[in-house]
Amino acid sequence: MIKKLSIIAASCMLVFMAAGCGSKSSSPSSTNAIDAKGATSSPTESMTLEVLNISEYTDTPEYKAFIERFQKKYPTIKIDSIAVPHEQYINKRNVMLASGSIVDLIWGNGVDQFDAINKGFLMPIDAAAKEAGVDMSKDFGDFKPDKDGKYYRFPIQQNNWMMFYNKKVFDDAKVPYPDAKVPMTWEEYAVTAQKLTNNASGKDKVYGMFYNNWGMYYYGYGSQLTDGKFYTSDGLSNINAPEFKRSLEWMNDVINVKKAAMPVAEYISNNTDFLSYWNGNYGMVVGAQWYAQLAATKKDKFPRDWKAGIAPMPVPKEMAGKHMNWSSIDSLAVPKNSKHAKEALIFAKEYVADYTLSTGTLPMYNKIDANKYFQELADKLKDDGITLEQVKYLFGGDAAVVNVEEKPVLGAPSEYEATFLDQMTQYYTGKISVDDVLKTVKQKVDKVIQDQKK
């Protein structure tokens, strides 16, 4: 939520954030209330922070307006935003940090940041955060240390996954809408997708299910079954567990047997991305809150003659009735070669309390008024018939939600994801078997994990 977060996955979060609530960015009143509780004085000597981020964030009006507000509040802290397109971001980050370039703060999703931790690029931030007026053990809810009892990440947001559906497609197929509280099982989801798929072609073709070519769409069912266990007790890959095989086979059934989703080869050749869902030719998609942001705030950019609905994401039949979420945390981190760790975390605190909120996203920083956020989002979604109760339940207001890992983040996370996606494509295009996929991924990932431990 950095997947081409997979690369494209972060892009989705990015675009949705860029799609955020303009009214908030122009009037950050809630941010001022937060500042009053934990204000940190500006340093007396001028300094420049080198902040590495993806251009999909830094090029937005929301980010630029945030920087202006930050500079006014902290006039001695200058921000030099190093903007890199998402598909080039990790390579640029690795080159800069490995070469000793001075960077004070870097953005990343779970895969990105644990990869940086494993490469020895980051410093623990506990002490610097305290100096910046933040208690890492209290100010972000149930956020645990990353390694050896220390924090290396300053959390921005936890993604909240749910199912989005096109009410017109359901109406045309005469299929009842999903329940607002009780999740479908994956098997029910597949059958419903098949019912929603029509026999047309070209621009009239409707698929019952849309998906993104990111790892969690293929192994996420298995993550729910294993409670997010992507690694064995000795730290090696667990991708060959029967639960992950079941997950991949389920997706194969939907795409290649039920024909209820676009074939993988066609998806790739058409340069399909997460925005394609909004053309109206798909019945359902499992996605994080960025889809709702597009529905709420970008109707001018994504005009539609249909209404969207939201419901809990599907679950395995063993978890029937449970509200589950693929948990992934985007964060900021301080590289070891930073010269201004305290000031970097002052900027990080303002980033989560001001910029993140201004994009229409609920940050993990628990000094935010969540009820105000839920109400504002519900107001923007009311034309779709989405209620405040639904928004609270699905966007972070359900304390009983079961969070499982969205993707592998501990050992060799970047290599894990890239290897999986490469092999998975060959399976869904009929070139290799599912057993060959899992065997090859485990062998390659285990080797990288072992090499990184040396």
Image (cartoon, helix red, strand yellow):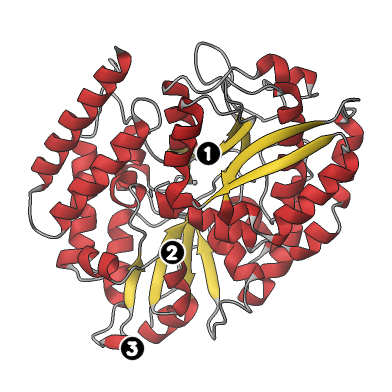
Q: Check disc 3 and give the amino acid type.
A: Asp
Residue 372, visible in the rendered structure:
no
Q: Would you name the residue on which mark 2 appears?
A: 274
**At which x and y percent is residue 47?**
79, 30
Q: Position of residue 445 (x, y in %)?
A: 23, 30
Would you call the spot at circle 3 few (<14 residues within 10 Å), some (14-19), or many (20 or more)? few
Left or right, 143 with respect to 206, comes to right
Q: Secondary structure at mark 2?
A: helix
- Mark whose residue sits in front, 3 or 1: 1
Q: Nearer the viewer, residue 186 or 355?
A: 355
User: Considering only order in the chain, which callout, 2 or 3, is on the residue closer to the N terminus?
Assistant: 3
Residue 210, located in which quarter of the rendered image?
A: bottom left
Local secondary structure at mark 1: strand
Residue designated by label 1: 108
- State the residue at coordinates (22%, 54%): 250
Task: For mark 3, give the secondary structure.
Answer: helix
Foreground residue among 52 and 323: 52
Report the residue at 57% width, 82% height from top: 303
* Mark 2: amino acid: Phe
- Residue that mark 3 sits on: 204
Position of 212 relative to 306 (above/below): above
Label total for image = 3
Q: CA distance from mark 3 to mark 2?
A: 19 Å
Q: Name the spot of residue 305 as percent of width and height, x first.
A: 54, 86
* Residue at left offset 39%, top offset 48%: 6
Spatial separation of the CA atoms under disc 3 and disc 1? 38 Å
